[in-house]
Image: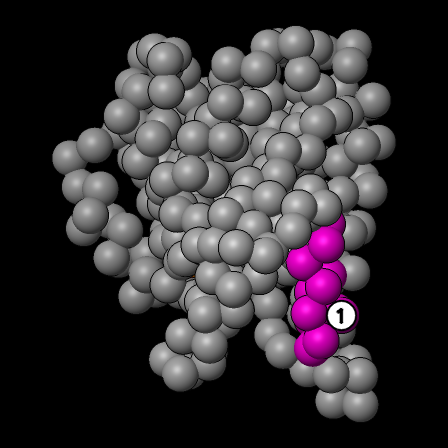
Amino acid sequence: MSSNLTGKKALVTGGTHGMGLAIVKALLAAGAEVVLTGRNEQTLEDARTELAGQAAHVVRSDAASMADIAALADTARERLGQIDHLFVNHGIAAFAELAEVTEAEWDRHFTINTKGAFFTVQALSPLLVDGGSIVFTTVGNDLIFPGLSAYSASKEAVRAFAHVLAAEFLPRKIRVNSVAPGFIETPTMGVPGLSEQEREEFVRQGHESTPLRRTGTVEEVATAALFLAVDATFSTNVELAVDGGFAQGLPVTH
Ligand SMILES: NC(=O)c1ccc[n+]([C@@H]2O[C@H](COP(=O)([O-])OP(=O)(O)OC[C@H]3O[C@@H](n4cnc5c(N)ncnc54)[C@H](OP(=O)(O)O)[C@@H]3O)[C@@H](O)[C@H]2O)c1
């Protein structure tokens, strides 16, 4: 990362582990002050310990709760004053094929991944500086997996409103972009609650089906996210795939 972010303020939802934490660490290394969120008390505490002594504010905020989202805006105003770069990264997924998808699970995906992402931006919008940036974490376009219909639909909706928000933020020169990860090795692989065996199988599938024949790292996603947020000053409404060629029509023949 080339840019110096000294004096810049950033907020990362779902920043306590995985890609979000890598984004937080890259921001801190570049000199930014960061508010990061999560929901699970243990992972919040782990993040507090890991980031102790740095310009990081670890805040419990459930993206499924409108009250928490409103409180997050208050906290961000108190701690940061304004936000230069907003990363809407939080997300959950759970495997269930058609017959097993319950209404509650469908709603959980859309409440956290879609509604939570949208209303986070709405609540934080007054704090965003003109000329700032928003980066959503979506998912690779062609990452089509049996059992992930609710998840995929919830992220497609984010992709859809990201385009509209890119247009709506034009008058404020706020750029709105997305990173679209493929198979990235995170503690959960994006699917909290997987058994270690299921997780290993998911990683194996990633190695086999990705044209570059490996899974990606959280640092590779963070590099792409910060590029969009900070350095890509003439890019808006772009979705940058970070997927080893997965969605780019390349063969997996070698
Ligand atoms: N890993 C992949 O291969 C992959 C691929 C494509 C897209 N993605 C997407 O990339 C993003 C990051 O994935 P990851 O693999 O890094 O996931 P992760 O390691 O599971 O991290 C997810 C983050 O979101 C937070 N979060 C979950 N539910 C939340 C809620 N209701 N409110 C606030 N925070 C919440 C988690 O905090 P808690 O500890 O509190 O749960 C955690 O900080 C997600 O949007 C995911 O869908 C992942």
Report the residue at 72% width, 11% height from top: 172
> Does the closest atom of ligand 1 sit within 8 Å of the Cβ of label 1?
no
Q: Residues within 10 Å of mark 1 (few under 14, many from 20)?
A: some
Magenta region, main secondary structure: loop
Residue carrying label 1? 149
At label 1, the amino acid type is: Ser
The image position of residue 214, as x and y in percent, is: 44, 54
Colour mapping: one colour
Vertical arrangement, residue 144 with respect to residue 219, above or below: below
Q: Which of the image's four quarters has the N terminus?
A: top left
At numbered mark 1, what does the secondary structure look like: helix, strand or loop? helix
Q: Residue 7 at x, y = what percent?
A: 35, 12
The picture quadrant where one finds residue 233 is top right
Residue 146 drawn in magenta: yes
> Which residue is found at the position 52% from the left and 64% from the top?
208
Above or below, 23 against 105 in this view is above
Residue at 51% across, 32% down: 225
Q: Determine the residue positioned at 57% across, 15% down.
A: 232
Can you say whether 35 is above or below 216 in the image? above
Q: Nearer the viewer, residue 28 or 41?
A: 28
**On the picture, is 97 further left or further right than 179?**
right
Nearest the viewer among 240 and 26 is 240
Which stretch is magenta?
A: 140-152
Q: In the image shown, does 130 or 147 lie closer to the viewer?
A: 147
Q: Is residue 108 above or below residue 25?
A: below
Asked whether 247 or 185 is in front, the reply is 247
- Residue most extreme to the bottom: 99
Q: Position of residue 58 (x, y in %)?
A: 34, 45
Instruction: Decide if residue 193 is on the left or right side of residue 249.
Output: left
